[in-house]
Amino acid sequence: MYLLNSTPIVLDDYGMHLYFFPLSVALFALMMVTQGAAYYYACRKPEKSKFYSGGTIEAAIFALLGLLIAFTYASARERFDERRRLITKEVNALQTTLLRFDLLPTQEKEELEQKLADYIDSRARFSQITDLKEGIKELEVTKSLQKEIWKLAVNATEKETKSSKQMLFLSSLNELFDIETMRLMTIVSHTPIWIFLMFCYIVFICSILAGFRMAKVGKFSWSYSVIFALATTVTMYMILDMEYPRFGLIRLTNAEKQIHELEKQINQPSK
């Protein structure tokens, strides 16, 4: 059951995309420096780096890196798909609520219709906001509209003999508000930060092993070093972009278009 007195949730999607590029550049630089440092260390003291250049150890560590990449990608992709699914589900719930709106008594429809239109406008604005304070402010507007709509709907059904048809409208409203809460929860649900820190730690170890391996060959390969660092960095960037898909390269634009189309439809008569 939806709680009408629920408090706004801090939306941590806002602003996170600003850190993706600096973090990626820092990781790329760290990998390049680490590979070079490990290479020159192994060249100066080859007797101390023999143990770390074993094929078994390298295979195990690089396999662990691949496992972490697969895990974080799968988690980010699952949450991305869930966000997209909930947007579609919310649009369907909005459409169902508008269809069941005709089940209410005629004299109660005008004010409630305007509140529903305002609610759809609020949800459409929320999907376009790029500032944290504006996002929380718009969320408060949404919560306020939910209370008003629910109160008007209950009053409309109480003035007439309650029928199963009219109760269907309350049921669709309840589902609609529940989905809005579920969407908020997906915004603040992410892979734990410790997983990403472990990812960086394993990348650091792999860079050391790569430097030792090049020392064993006897030549520092810039192409090998850059390709390894670039591939790892781009992969991490894309995973983070999918984890926080509000403003990056990977977005929910196509899914959110459904809400804007519905907003245009409901505002069409007033034009």
Image (cartoon, rainbow, N blue to C red):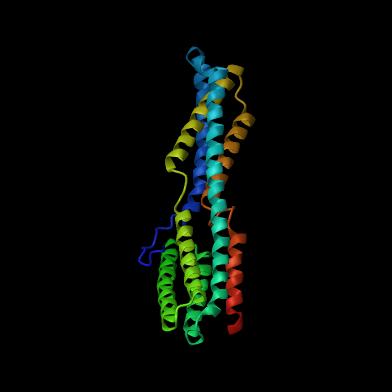
Q: Position of residue 195 (x, y in %)?
A: 46, 39
Front-lying residue, 16 or 159: 159
Image quarter of the N terminus: bottom left
Residue located 58% across and 41% down the image: 235
Q: Is residue 61 above or below residue 77?
A: above
Residue 75 in sight here = yes
Instruction: From the top left corner, tell me how far across and down residue 164 is, in percent.
Output: 50, 74
Relative to 69, say whether 87 is above or below: below
Farthest residue to the right: give it: 223
221 w.r.t. 243: above or below: above
147 up-or-down from 249: above or below: below
Q: Residue at x 63, y 29 (%)?
A: 224
Q: Residue at x 47, y 14 (%)?
A: 48
Q: Position of residue 153 (x, y in %)?
A: 44, 77
Question: In the rendered image, is residue 237 in sight?
Answer: no
Quarter of the figure that contains the C terminus:
bottom right
Tell which of 149 and 7 is nearer to you: 149
Q: How many marks?
A: 0
Q: Quadrant of residue 229?
A: top right
Furthest toward the top, the residue is 47
- State the residue in front, 258 or 200: 258
Which residue, as the protein is rendered here, is positioned at the far bottom? 107
Is residue 10 found left or right of 22 in the rendered image? left
